[in-house]
Amino acid sequence: MNEEKMTEQTEFEAEKSPFNWTAIFFISLFLGFFGVDRFYIGKKISGVIKLLTLGGLGIWWLVDLIIIATGKSTDASKKKIRNTNKQRVLAFIFLAPLTIFFAMCLIAVLFSSPEELEKIKAEREQKKQAVQTSEEPEPSFTDSRDGKKYKTVKIGSQTWMAENLNYDAKSSKCYENSPDNCTKYGSLYDWNTALKACPSGWHLPNGDEWQKLVDIAGGDKIAGTKLKAASGWKDNDGASGNGTDEFGFSALPGGLGRSDGGFRDVGDCGYWWSASESSSYGAYDRSMIYVDETARWASDGKSYLFSVRCVQN
């Protein structure tokens, strides 16, 4: 009788793998995605495959863990890596939450409607766009032509000067020919001069670029309030004509100049050229006024002297 028990014990030991069950379980748990558990027990080919597929995208990793937990796993020589009852309980304490998590993910994928999946994709794209939009540009720019420094602001995907251009170009003028007004409001330019006035790396915005800015600020009817500076605008019957300057654009009422040498509207209105031509004698411009919230789009004669805002190339 004792000989039979000894024979059974010998056969059991012969079938049992020399690898430690606890070691293989935790190697599989933490490094199974990379096939390390398979390399550890000598199964090199399947280890390579498991590594390349990242544990079969998690499925193979979980299946191997379950097989090891139940004591059914074998090494390269097909000997069983046996475990005790206590070890099985320990294994399933670890496996239970993992199994539930994978099951929930699988259910979510299988039962999500195309509309829900599209919504998730759209939300991810919005978050990505928000991160891109929120990236800060260089806060200032120095014009190498005269050393003047300008504040800059990124609004949406565009980077604008946050001040009117004050480059002393041929034909440009200060309001009422006062240098102090150039310091405060920037220079005034006729359209042909404005086209070439911006420094290298910057340009006079066209109609589409202006519209993109205005749309971000809420559209033509209310963009003026959000783009106007928070001070410097005339009061409207006791009510402030200033804006909220929500985007840091800081538009100021620099007025305009005429070809006859006259000036008007400083403190009341701001006019900014666009690069878009309306006719042989006219071009489009944006304007804002102290009495309302609008950001108007109009066509005026090219000989008028308006302010210039440059946008980065």
Image (cartoon, rainbow, N blue to C red):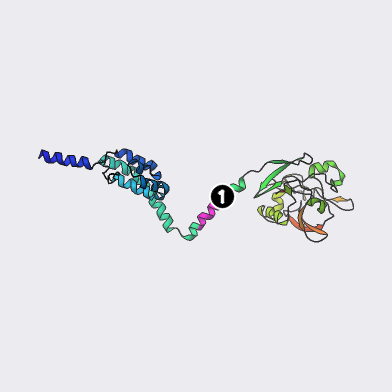
**Image location (x, y in percent) of residue 249:** 71, 47
* Start-end of magenta stretch: 118-128
**Image location (x, y in percent) of residue 106:** 40, 54
Q: Is residue 123 magenta?
A: yes
Q: Which residue is mark 1?
A: 128
Which is more toward the observer, 148 or 295? 148
Residue 298 seen from this side: yes
Q: Residue at x 72, y 52 (%)?
A: 224
**Image location (x, y in percent) of residue 80:** 26, 44
- Answer with left or right where residue 11 lies relative to residue 274: left
- Answer with left or right where residue 139 lies relative to residue 100: right
Secondary structure beneath disc 1? helix
Find residue 112 and report its image quarter: bottom left
Q: Residue furthest right?
A: 260
Q: Is residue 312 magenta?
A: no
Quarter of the N terminus within the rendering: top left
Q: Residue at x 43, y 55 (%)?
A: 109
Residue 97 seen from this side: no
